[in-house]
Image (tube, coloured by chain):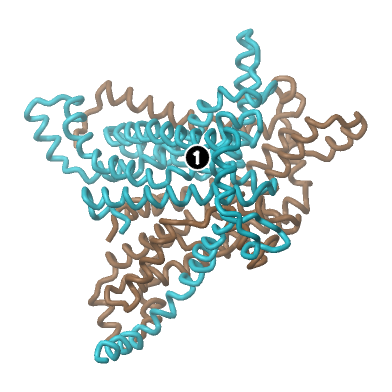
Amino acid sequence: MKRLRRFGHRLWKDRMLTLMALPALALMILFNYVPMSGLVLAFKKFDYSKGLFWSPWNGLENFRLLFLSGDTFWRITRNTLLYYVMFTAVGTICEVALAIGIYELVFKKLGKGIQSILILPTFISFVAVSYIVEALLQNNTGLVNQFLMSLGKESIYFYMESKYWPMILLLVKIWKGTGYGSVLYLATLSGVDTQLYEAAMLDGANRRQQRRYITLPMLLPMITIMLLLSIGSVMHSDTGIFYQTTKNIGALYETTQVLDSYVLNAIMKSSNYGVTTAITLYQSVIGFALTVSVNMVVRKISPENALF
Amino acid sequence: MRKKVTAGQIILLIVLIILAAACLFPLALVVTASFSSEISLIQNGFLLIPEEWSLDGWNYVMNLGTQLLVSYRNTFFITIVGTLTSLLVMSMLAFVLSHRDFVFRKLITMILLGTMLFSGGRLATYLVNTTIYHLKDTMLILCLPTVSAMYVIILRTYIQQNITDSLLDSAKIDGAGDFRIYAQIVMPLLPPALASVGFMVAIGYWNNWETSYLYITSNSKMPLQLLLMKTEKMIEELNRSDIGAQALAMMSEMLPSVSARMAMLITVLGPIMIAYPFFQRYFIQGLTVGSVKG
């Protein structure tokens, strides 16, 4: 009774704050939590006339179809994972290298300017990127093919051959993400005590040794945390890069279609909603498990970077 | 730190400058292509310095009139309304969560983090939005406020670090209610954080193609990104289909040429390029604050 009264008192005291939290709360419930209920469709046979919640159940049929019918499911899972590994590995190396480069540059003003330029592509939409990539790769007029032809070589039909695309997408990713990704590492480095370097120099350490024994160890915790946190979103890729840059061309699906772009394509084509929901459920469940377990690890090594 | 200009430093500088140039190169290509004549683009392809300059592409964009203007208006409307409402909603939540003794603090933080942990996925969200909320082909779905856990945490951390308890206490003693403290004390101190989060949120609205692609069907609600996508699709279809030569000639007359498409692209990228230098300082700060959770 006493506790209830105390709670009532606190509630009354915080009535204005509660009111101020309401808009955000309502948005999250309506557009984040209610849609989760739509995942029941993974266990249903979708019938447009009956709608989301009144369609008949069909047990695990959608999953059976998913796992057994053809290689599409395995292919998009494989692509999702391989692109994650490739983007994360190469991306992190480039970001760290760039951060160290800018950090070591004595021309600080120029370094800032260069950094600003390198961040710029992050803000270009993937629709625009697809225009730009097309200007470079078009069959006859693209810059790359112009160059090949001027060397007397055959032009390459990039938009028909899937084998070139992992490389092309990696380049797009590096172009778009490296400057932005390096900001965090650069900020970490600017917090390093410069006395460390002075002491190292007194001990006769050269540039490379300083980099190896001071700079890299200082960056390592941040690198580890960023890598760990990124594992939580393995199942989700940036849809833009896979859907827009490839112009969603069927001939390129073999090496470029990932879970997210597959789902988007399925929605636009209104193909089997039950099976497609099963794919999104599979994405969400694995994503959830990974985020929670990764968070447990992060909390052990660096509590202030853990999500919860 | 070490301030010697050595040969190594010069090499490093040159490498970085080359990287920056490589980074800008594709953009420069788009700009010059928009000023190329169509014939030189078709015959010689994309070149950094075109054979023949021309303003045809830009003339086309200037004369495009209605649809481009409508799309421009839509994108501006969505970006402004979406960003302002997002900032209002998120800063209020961040202010509320910055009170360590707030009665629902644990519960609301859990709900907030829950949105990062699990999602209904693209299809379930789409079906709920269209069949239950009936948001298909509405402006509302495009400018719905964003509530992102990451941004709320950035704002909350900023409030906790920059607004001292003594300031809040003295306001309380003077009889200010929570909302007045938010509006008259916290808000005036918040602009740097709002600028950094606001810029990211605004870019999100400006560049969002997916929502309009999924939900928008009528031309009057089409934002710029969707217009770019539709133009691209029309051109592809034109290249693919085996329609008669006469129909083809008629259609291609209506369609933007390559240089016109590049000019269109610049009108879409332009505002971001112009806004970026003003916001980049805040944006870098915000990104760094976000990495430290309070």
Give above or below for B98 relative to B47: below
Q: Position of residue B260 (x, y in %)?
A: 73, 38
Taking the spot 32% from the left edge, 44% from the top edge, the residue there is A228
Q: How many marks?
A: 1
Taking the spot 41% from the left edge, 42% from the top edge, the residue there is A180
The answer, for residue A226, to whether it is visible in the render is: yes
Residue furthest toward the top?
A152
Give above or below for B288 relative to A152: below
Q: Position of residue A227 (x, y in %)?
A: 33, 41
Three-letter code, disc 1:
Pro
Q: Position of residue A214 (x, y in %)?
A: 17, 34
Taking the spot 34% from the left edge, 55% from the top edge, the residue there is B290
Residue situated in front as seen by the camera: B168 or B220: B220
Taking the spot 37% from the left edge, 54% from the top edge, the residue there is B286
Residue situated in front as seen by the camera: A228 or A198: A228
Colour representing chain A: cyan
Q: Which residue is mark 1?
A: A121
Secondary structure at numbered mark 1: helix
In this rendering, would B158 be left or right of B28? Answer: left
The answer, for residue B49, to whether it is visible in the render is: no
In this rendering, would A167 be left or right of A210? Answer: right
Colour representing chain B: brown
The quadrant holding residue A65 is top right
Give above or below for B154 relative to A238: below
Q: Position of residue B114 (x, y in %)?
A: 41, 61
Q: Chain of mark 1?
A: A
Residue situated in front as seen by the camera: A84 or B202: A84
Label 1 packing within 10 angstroms: few (<14), some (14-19), many (20+): many
* Quadrant into which the N terminus of chain B falls: top left
In this rendering, would A209 be left or right of B207? Answer: left
